[in-house]
Image: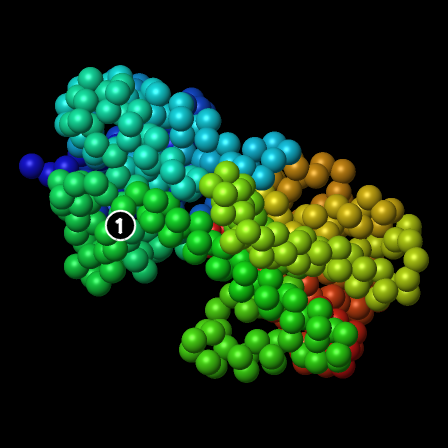
Amino acid sequence: MALKITVIGTGYLGATHAAAMAELGFEVLALDVVPEKIEMLRRGEVPMFEPGLEELLRKHVAGIEGSTERLRFTMDWAEIGAFGDVHFVCVNTPQRHGEYACDMSYVDSAFASLAPHLHNAALVVGKSTVPVGSADRLAAYLAEHAPAGEGAELAWNPEFLREGFAVNDTLHPDRLVVGVRSERAEKLLREVYAAPIAEGSPFVVTDFPTAELVKTSANSFLATKISFINAMAEVCEAAGGDVAKLAEAIGYDDRIGKKFLRAGIGFGGGCLPKDIRAFMARAGELGADQALTFLREIDSINMRQRGQMVELTRQALGGGPFLGKRVAVLGATFKPDSDDVRDSPALNVAGQIHLQGGQVTVYDPKGMTNARRLFPTLGYADSAVEAVRGADVVLHLTEWREFRELDPAALGEVAATRLVLDGRNALDPSLWRAAGWTYRAMGRPTA
Ligand code: UDX
């Protein structure tokens, strides 16, 4: 009989995982504790913008005309416990307020709610990003609190999906990592992931701590790559070099690789910044803090980029205060193809300039609702052209395709000054310069 799967938590990770499991042919029951979310999902609507996710949900959500009926939603833990052979825990682990460590309360409360309903043998699979050591602790918790006792087993299976590519990354992962303690757990997970394994996704079997660490170390490496290239941008800026050429040239070495070497205002979002901080905090608890002191530097290089963008803007406007200056900001989300504004470098830069008296107008293709909610005092426009109208300077802060495809000549007609600062090194300088714009980017020569 085919495995029955539950997904606990229907945020980014959970909603995508539930839809992907249904796409792989499983019967799926997903739970959330927020009634509004469940109602939306039952209608086949997704509470965030993620390319392809809504279509995939609508293909499977029960009650939607023409769907496979394989995906259902509930708020009832007893139903979850009775239904699932494999339970994926996909709840959030945000940064704790005012601290580096991550907040495990959602994970802990998910386990506390689930455990008493595990009457039959089942595999509980943690996917949330957690401090190393959590899986050991949660396995002991399950053994103690699940009526099935040892029959309720734990596995850890970190998730590497990227926002904007979540569906594809889940259905066609570049690797699957599973921390297991028994052959039975490994066998069940091989069954769940039979399709991607058959397609060639490597399946890496480890112990619990290694599985947990793969995730945090992968994110630390990615953050390090970005901060490395941003440090090189600072040196290029000082020495008159061109960081984009430098990145291209070092990237030809496949030991280095081309990806994640785009200099600019740095990384943000709900993962990289908080994950490296939580990793440092956990290493400290383990007495291994010295091993990760470099991550403090990675974090501070990253945060410095935002301030440098503000200073670049100030200099480009002739120095001095921003008072009375009209600043068009293209981009609000932390990356393109997402409506996520959590720890967004773009909004941080926009907010700093606004606080210093600049008259800021923001436009983003998908992030306007979330941006307005987070920064209600900023100015907003409904299109790039409207944001740029009358602007003394245009800041390109999130590299949406829509912005690369803008016509600089047409924008030049509405801007007060043809001055563009590219905080993402993603526009084509020659196009903008040909249309009479002064183009500046961090770590690149002025002309
Ligand atoms: C990241 C990891 O990539 C993913 O594997 C993990 O599961 C979750 O965290 P995500 O948060 O979606 O995914 O964003 P990512 O694509 O990694 O980008 C992170 C940030 O880095 C963005 O703000 C992006 O603009 C920035 N970035 C990325 C750069 O500044 N330069 C680059 O070269 C690449």
Residue 350 placement (x, y as % from top left): 74, 50
Chosen colour scheme: rainbow
Residue 133 placement (x, y as % from top left): 38, 38
Q: Nearer the viewer, residue 116 or 88?
A: 116
Residue 110 placement (x, y as % from top left): 37, 25
Q: Residues within 10 Å of mark 1 (few under 14, many from 20)?
A: some
Does dot 1 land on a helix, a strand or a loop? strand
Q: Residue at x 25, y 60 (%)?
A: 201
Q: Residue at x 14, y 37 (%)?
A: 3
Q: Would residue 181 appear left or right of 288 to someone viewing this image?
A: left
Given the current orientation, which residue lies at the most extreme left position? 1
Q: Is residue 103 visible?
A: yes
Could you tell me the amino acid type at mark 1?
A: Thr
Q: Nearer the viewer, residue 343 or 218?
A: 218
Q: Quadrant of the N terminus?
A: top left
Tell me if residue 122 comes above or below residue 164 in the rendering. above
Q: Residue at x 60, y 79 (%)?
A: 246
Residue 223 placement (x, y as % from top left): 54, 57
Q: Residue at x 38, y 35 (%)?
A: 134
Place residue 114 in its image quadrant. Answer: top left
Q: Would residue 57 appear left or right of 271 to someone viewing this image?
A: left
Q: Quadrant of the C terminus?
A: bottom right
Q: Nearer the viewer, residue 346 or 97?
A: 97
Q: Is residue 192 visible?
A: no
Q: Would residue 365 appear left or right of 188 to someone viewing this image?
A: right
Give the number of callouts: 1
Q: Would residue 322 appear left or right of 226 to someone viewing this image?
A: right
Tell me if residue 38 comes above or below residue 158 in the rendering. above
Q: Nearer the viewer, residue 347 or 403?
A: 347
Read off the residue under disc 1: 206
